[in-house]
Image: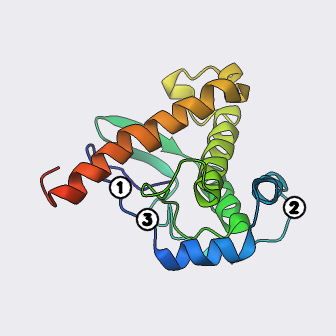
Protein backbone atom coordinates (compact mmCIF):
# COMPACT_ATOMS: atom_id res chain seq x y z
CA UNK A 1 0.00 0.00 0.00
CA UNK A 2 2.78 2.42 0.90
CA UNK A 3 4.66 1.89 -2.33
CA UNK A 4 7.94 1.03 -0.60
CA UNK A 5 8.94 -1.49 -3.25
CA UNK A 6 12.67 -1.02 -2.97
CA UNK A 7 14.60 -2.16 0.07
CA UNK A 8 15.38 0.65 2.54
CA UNK A 9 12.94 3.08 0.90
CA UNK A 10 11.99 5.86 3.29
CA UNK A 11 8.27 6.58 3.65
CA UNK A 12 6.98 10.07 3.02
CA UNK A 13 4.34 12.05 4.88
CA UNK A 14 0.70 12.24 3.80
CA UNK A 15 -0.49 15.51 2.34
CA UNK A 16 -2.05 17.84 4.87
CA UNK A 17 -4.94 18.39 2.46
CA UNK A 18 -5.67 14.63 2.55
CA UNK A 19 -5.70 14.65 6.34
CA UNK A 20 -8.02 17.69 6.45
CA UNK A 21 -10.35 16.11 3.89
CA UNK A 22 -10.36 12.85 5.87
CA UNK A 23 -11.23 14.62 9.13
CA UNK A 24 -14.10 16.45 7.46
CA UNK A 25 -15.73 13.06 6.82
CA UNK A 26 -14.86 11.02 9.91
CA UNK A 27 -15.23 12.04 13.54
CA UNK A 28 -14.75 8.75 15.39
CA UNK A 29 -13.25 5.27 15.07
CA UNK A 30 -16.66 3.59 14.72
CA UNK A 31 -17.32 5.53 11.52
CA UNK A 32 -13.96 4.37 10.14
CA UNK A 33 -14.59 0.75 11.08
CA UNK A 34 -18.05 0.84 9.52
CA UNK A 35 -16.77 2.32 6.25
CA UNK A 36 -13.90 -0.18 6.03
CA UNK A 37 -16.08 -3.19 6.88
CA UNK A 38 -19.06 -2.45 4.63
CA UNK A 39 -17.94 -3.68 1.22
CA UNK A 40 -21.25 -2.60 -0.29
CA UNK A 41 -20.96 0.98 0.95
CA UNK A 42 -20.49 3.72 -1.60
CA UNK A 43 -17.00 5.05 -2.03
CA UNK A 44 -16.16 8.50 -0.70
CA UNK A 45 -13.85 9.14 -3.62
CA UNK A 46 -13.85 7.45 -7.03
CA UNK A 47 -11.58 4.39 -7.12
CA UNK A 48 -9.82 6.01 -10.09
CA UNK A 49 -8.54 8.75 -7.73
CA UNK A 50 -6.70 6.24 -5.50
CA UNK A 51 -3.05 6.60 -6.42
CA UNK A 52 -1.72 3.98 -3.99
CA UNK A 53 -0.87 0.86 -5.96
CA UNK A 54 -1.42 2.77 -9.24
CA UNK A 55 1.97 1.74 -10.60
CA UNK A 56 1.38 -1.93 -9.81
CA UNK A 57 -0.04 -4.23 -12.44
CA UNK A 58 -1.29 -7.74 -11.91
CA UNK A 59 1.21 -10.55 -12.39
CA UNK A 60 4.58 -11.55 -11.05
CA UNK A 61 6.80 -8.74 -9.72
CA UNK A 62 10.30 -8.66 -8.37
CA UNK A 63 10.31 -6.87 -5.00
CA UNK A 64 13.65 -6.70 -3.24
CA UNK A 65 15.21 -10.12 -3.64
CA UNK A 66 11.93 -12.01 -3.94
CA UNK A 67 9.04 -12.47 -6.32
CA UNK A 68 5.49 -11.41 -5.51
CA UNK A 69 2.41 -12.64 -7.34
CA UNK A 70 -0.21 -9.90 -7.53
CA UNK A 71 -3.71 -10.66 -8.77
CA UNK A 72 -5.88 -7.92 -10.24
CA UNK A 73 -8.63 -8.79 -7.76
CA UNK A 74 -6.41 -7.98 -4.76
CA UNK A 75 -5.33 -4.67 -6.29
CA UNK A 76 -8.95 -3.73 -7.01
CA UNK A 77 -10.08 -4.76 -3.54
CA UNK A 78 -7.34 -2.69 -1.89
CA UNK A 79 -8.17 0.38 -3.98
CA UNK A 80 -11.89 0.00 -3.24
CA UNK A 81 -11.18 -0.19 0.50
CA UNK A 82 -9.10 2.98 0.33
CA UNK A 83 -11.81 4.73 -1.72
CA UNK A 84 -14.46 3.86 0.90
CA UNK A 85 -12.24 5.57 3.47
CA UNK A 86 -11.52 8.56 1.24
CA UNK A 87 -7.77 7.82 1.14
CA UNK A 88 -6.13 8.60 -2.18
CA UNK A 89 -2.62 7.69 -1.12
CA UNK A 90 -2.05 5.33 1.78
CA UNK A 91 0.51 7.05 3.97
CA UNK A 92 0.21 6.95 7.77
CA UNK A 93 0.98 10.22 9.51
CA UNK A 94 4.25 9.44 11.27
CA UNK A 95 4.17 12.88 12.89
CA UNK A 96 0.96 12.01 14.76
CA UNK A 97 -0.05 9.42 17.33
CA UNK A 98 -0.59 5.85 16.10
CA UNK A 99 -4.10 6.11 17.56
CA UNK A 100 -5.13 9.26 15.66
CA UNK A 101 -8.25 8.90 13.50
CA UNK A 102 -6.31 9.16 10.26
CA UNK A 103 -3.76 6.58 11.40
CA UNK A 104 -6.63 4.36 12.55
CA UNK A 105 -8.06 4.48 9.02
CA UNK A 106 -4.66 3.59 7.54
CA UNK A 107 -4.36 0.66 9.96
CA UNK A 108 -7.90 -0.53 9.18
CA UNK A 109 -7.22 -0.40 5.43
CA UNK A 110 -3.87 -2.18 5.72
CA UNK A 111 -5.07 -4.96 7.98
CA UNK A 112 -8.32 -5.47 6.09
CA UNK A 113 -6.60 -5.78 2.73
CA UNK A 114 -3.81 -7.94 4.19
CA UNK A 115 -6.30 -10.31 5.81
CA UNK A 116 -8.33 -10.50 2.60
CA UNK A 117 -5.23 -11.26 0.55
CA UNK A 118 -4.11 -14.00 2.97
CA UNK A 119 -7.50 -15.70 2.89
CA UNK A 120 -7.45 -15.37 -0.91
CA UNK A 121 -4.10 -17.22 -0.99
CA UNK A 122 -2.11 -14.22 -2.25
CA UNK A 123 0.73 -15.03 0.16
CA UNK A 124 0.80 -18.80 -0.36
CA UNK A 125 4.33 -18.55 -1.78
CA UNK A 126 5.46 -17.15 1.60
CA UNK A 127 3.82 -19.99 3.57
CA UNK A 128 1.64 -17.53 5.51
CA UNK A 129 -0.68 -19.55 7.73
CA UNK A 130 -4.25 -18.29 7.14
CA UNK A 131 -5.19 -18.89 10.78
CA UNK A 132 -3.06 -15.87 11.72
CA UNK A 133 -5.07 -13.61 9.40
CA UNK A 134 -7.89 -13.63 11.94
CA UNK A 135 -5.64 -12.95 14.94
CA UNK A 136 -5.96 -9.20 15.44
CA UNK A 137 -4.19 -9.48 18.81
CA UNK A 138 -1.13 -10.46 16.78
CA UNK A 139 -1.65 -8.32 13.67
CA UNK A 140 -2.29 -4.97 15.36
CA UNK A 141 0.94 -4.95 17.41
CA UNK A 142 2.88 -6.25 14.38
CA UNK A 143 1.43 -3.45 12.24
CA UNK A 144 2.14 -0.82 14.91
CA UNK A 145 5.70 -2.05 15.32
CA UNK A 146 6.43 -2.00 11.59
CA UNK A 147 4.70 1.30 10.78
CA UNK A 148 4.93 3.39 13.94
CA UNK A 149 8.30 2.16 15.18
CA UNK A 150 10.51 0.84 12.36
CA UNK A 151 9.25 3.02 9.51
CA UNK A 152 8.72 6.01 11.79
CA UNK A 153 12.34 5.80 12.94
CA UNK A 154 13.51 5.61 9.32
CA UNK A 155 11.31 8.60 8.46
CA UNK A 156 12.57 10.67 11.44
CA UNK A 157 16.23 9.93 10.64
CA UNK A 158 15.71 10.88 6.99
CA UNK A 159 13.98 14.09 8.06
CA UNK A 160 17.05 15.08 10.10
CA UNK A 161 19.54 14.30 7.32
CA UNK A 162 17.82 14.30 3.92
CA UNK A 163 19.29 11.75 1.53
CA UNK A 164 21.41 9.96 4.11
CA UNK A 165 19.11 6.99 4.50
Q: CA distance from mark 1 to mark 3?
A: 16 Å
Pair 3/2: label in front? 2
Tell me: 98 left or right of 73: left
- Residue hosting label 1: 11
Q: In front: 31, or 39?
A: 31
Contact (Cβ within 8 Å) of mark 1 with mark 3: no
Secondary structure state at the residue bearing disc 3? loop
- Residue hosting label 3: 55
Residue 117 in percent (x, y) is at: 64, 40
User: Could you tell which of marks 2 and 1 lies nearer the N-terminus?
Assistant: 1
| Residue count near mark 2 (Cα–Cα under 10 Å), binned few <14, some 14–19, many ≥20 | few
In which image quadrant can residue 27 be found?
Answer: bottom right
Residue 49 in percent (x, y) is at: 59, 77
| Residue count near mark 1 (Cα–Cα under 10 Å), binned few <14, some 14–19, many ≥20 | some
Tell me: 163 left or right of 108: left
Contact (Cβ within 8 Å) of mark 2 with mark 1: no
| Residue name at image x 70 percent, y 20 percent | 131
Secondary structure state at the residue bearing disc 2? loop
- Residue hosting label 2: 40
Q: Can the viewer see residue 49 in this picture? A: no
| Residue name at image x 56 percent, y 30 percent | 141
Q: In front: 58, or 103?
A: 103
Amino acid sequence: LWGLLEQKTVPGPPSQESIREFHSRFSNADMIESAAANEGAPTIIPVSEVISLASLKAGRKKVGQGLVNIEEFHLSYSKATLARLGIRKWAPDLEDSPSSLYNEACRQAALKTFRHAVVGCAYTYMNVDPKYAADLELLIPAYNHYVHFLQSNRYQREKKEVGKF
